[in-house]
Structure formats: structure tokens, C-alpha cells
Image (cartoon, rainbow, N blue to C red):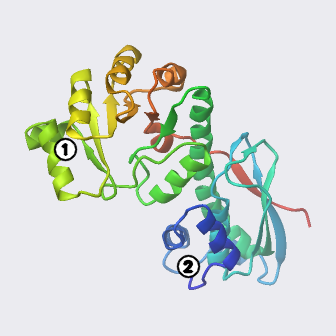
């Protein structure tokens, strides 16, 4: 699999904010897992002539929000030596209904069937995350709150899953431990207190954004007085969140987190917080069912 991606696919990934090299790594790893050390599809090689060509459609089998179409295209290109032509007929972030054709692929039949499962695994996963995220975004409509993801992602798929959150109408909190400092209870205990922990982070990494987890109004006030401008309000009731909003005002962005469900999303959004943090977007989203169907010959 030494083939490089086509310019249109690279452009589509770039425009989506997906790092091309990281997507190539994800795709190559997934293909190698499926094809094994001998890099072969024994079923397709034994049942289909090498010169046979076909066209297939990627079709939604359920209503939802699609994400990862350019990633699926990358699978077909990298696995086939770019002998498969991919035409996308939907756009990431779009609501789709059962029966919608999302993409069409044309090329050697063996190549289509060899890439099928890997392309669908990634596309169905990303679309499932986007669909789940859109449900939260819809539930928060009419409030100022936006749904946030967390670091509770599938190992190796973080960039794809966090992209899917964006495609579904959510926002990424942080990509990892390197780009945002998040002071949680254990950090406060180990550092000797909330203010001490905040000052140490700010002194060590003056340019890194700092977020502080708080559980009381007093901690929220202490945090903003120390200089924090983003607070994680952990496991607070709507009533307590309103008290924090009143005490902090516009001195910091506020995030509600901990045990949130769709059933209470609007209630929490109405408290005046800026974000609701939901780990389930990436750790518990079911896939969106998508299939590849060969067209009749």
C-alpha cells in the first residue's frame, strides 16, 4: 500500500480539518489488520476474475448524519492503488435518510470488495458519532449552550471521532494532554490547592489554555480570582449551576459535566452555561448503518 491519496481526497480532508498523514495512518492500519501479513482477500481473489469491474453505491440504511466520506474514499484509493474512482454524492454533516446514496465507487470488483468493510467500519463509526452529537445539538437549540466532547475516544481514532463531533454540530474540548491544561481534583490535592495548581501551570506553560474543575460556588469564585477563564462545573444540579453563573458572570466560560443525558440537556442548557460536556458522544455512540451494494450487472 504505497499509493498516495489523490489530490481531490487530500483537499477534502484538508477542508474538513482532518490531518492527511493521520488519516492515512488510520486507514493503512485498518487495512493491514483486515488483509493480514500476506495482504490478501482470499474470498475475492478466488471467486472474482482479476479483470472484472463493477460499480457500487454506499447507501444509508438508517436516518442520521453522515461523516467521514473522504475517509472512506481514502480507503478505496489506498487499498486499490487508486484504480477505484470515488464520487461523493452527499456531504459530511448532512442529514440523510434510509435509502440515500452517499457515494458511488467504480473499479475492479476485487478492489471494491476488499476495501468495503474497512471503508464502512470507519464511515459508520464516524457517522454514528455525528448522529449522536446532532441529537444533543438539537436538544440544546434555543439555549446558548454547545455540546462538547472529551478524551474518552477509541484509541487510535481520536482525530476521526472528534471530527465527527464537529460534523454533528458539537465542539472539541481538547485534543489531548498537550494542548490544554485541565486541573482536576487530583491535581489540586497533589499541588496543595486550587490556586497553587493554577499558578504552577501558568508559570510553567504561560501560553497554554487552563481549565479548572470546580464542584462548589466557592471554588468557582476562587478559580476566576486566580485567573482561570474556563471552569468545569462537575456534577452540579441545575440550581447550583445557576448560582455559579450568577457568581462568575462573564469572567469565565462555564461547562456543565458529569452524568448528563439527553432527557435533561435542555434543562441544563437553560442554566446559562456555555457548554455541556458529554463523554458518550465518542465512547457510547452506536454506528449509523451504511452498506455497500453492487449494482446489478
Separation of marks 2 and 1 at Cα, in angstroms: 51 Å
Residue 135 position in % (x across, y down)? 61, 33
Q: Quadrant of residue 197?
A: top left
User: Would you place residue 287 above or below residue 74 in this image?
Assistant: above
Binning the other alpha carbons within 10 Å of mark 2 as few (below 14), some (14 to 19) or many (20 upward) gives few
- In the rendered view, does 97 fall on the left or right side of 65? right
* Quarter of the image where the N terminus is located: bottom right
Q: Residue at x 75, y 44 (%)?
A: 96
| Label placed on residue 39 | 2
Q: Residue at x 39, y 33 (%)?
A: 255
Binning the other alpha carbons within 10 Å of mark 1 as few (below 14), some (14 to 19) or many (20 upward) gives many
Do callouts 2 and 1 mark residues in contact (Cβ within 8 Å)? no
| Label placed on residue 61 | none
Please state which of the two labelled residues, at mark 2 or mark 1, is closer to the viewer: 1
Residue 286 position in % (x across, y down)? 57, 41
Question: Where is mark 1, residue-wise?
Answer: 198
Amino acid at each position: 500500500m504505497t499509493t498516495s491519496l489523490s489530490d481531490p481526497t487530500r483537499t477534502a480532508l484538508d477542508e474538513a480539518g482532518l490531518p492527511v498523514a493521520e488519516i492515512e495512518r488510520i486507514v493503512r492500519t485498518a487495512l493491514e489488520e483486515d488483509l493480514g501479513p500476506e495482504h490478501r482477500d482470499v474470498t475475492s481473489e478466488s471467486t472474482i476474475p482479476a479483470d472484472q469491474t463493477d460499480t457500487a453505491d454506499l447507501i444509508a440504511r438508517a436516518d442520521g448524519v453522515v461523516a467521514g466520506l473522504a475517509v472512506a474514499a481514502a480507503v478505496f484509493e489506498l487499498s486499490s492503488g487508486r484504480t477505484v474512482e470515488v464520487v461523493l454524492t452527499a456531504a459530511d454533516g448532512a442529514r440523510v435518510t434510509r435509502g440515500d446514496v452517499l457515494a458511488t465507487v467504480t473499479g475492479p470488483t476485487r478492489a471494491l470488495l476488499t476495501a468495503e468493510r474497512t471503508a464502512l467500519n470507519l464511515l459508520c463509526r464516524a457517522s454514528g458519532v455525528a448522529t449522536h452529537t446532532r441529537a444533543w445539538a438539537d436538544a440544546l437549540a434555543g439555549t446558548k449552550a454547545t455540546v462538547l466532547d472529551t478524551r474518552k475516544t477509541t484509541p487510535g481514532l481520536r482525530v476521526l471521532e472528534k471530527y465527527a463531533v464537529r460534523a454533528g454540530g458539537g465542539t472539541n474540548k481538547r485534543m489531548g494532554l498537550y494542548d490544554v491544561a485541565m486541573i482536576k481534583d487530583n491535581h489540586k490535592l497533589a499541588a496543595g490547592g486550587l490556586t497553587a495548581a493554577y499558578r504552577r501551570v501558568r508559570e510553567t506553560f504561560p501560553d497554554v489554555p487552563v481549565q479548572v474543575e470546580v464542584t462548589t460556588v466557592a471554588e468557582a469564585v476562587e478559580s476566576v480570582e486566580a485567573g482561570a477563564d474556563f471552569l468545569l462545573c462537575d456534577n452540579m444540579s441545575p440550581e447550583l449551576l445557576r448560582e455559579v453563573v450568577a457568581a462568575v458572570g462573564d469572567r469565565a466560560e462555564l461547562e456543565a459535566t458529569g452524568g448528563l443525558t439527553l432527557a435533561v440537556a435542555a434543562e441544563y442548557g437553560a442554566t446559562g452555561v456555555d457548554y455541556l460536556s458529554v463523554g458518550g458522544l465518542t465512547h457510547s455512540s452506536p454506528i449509523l448503518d451504511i452498506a455497500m451494494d453492487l449494482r446489478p450487472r
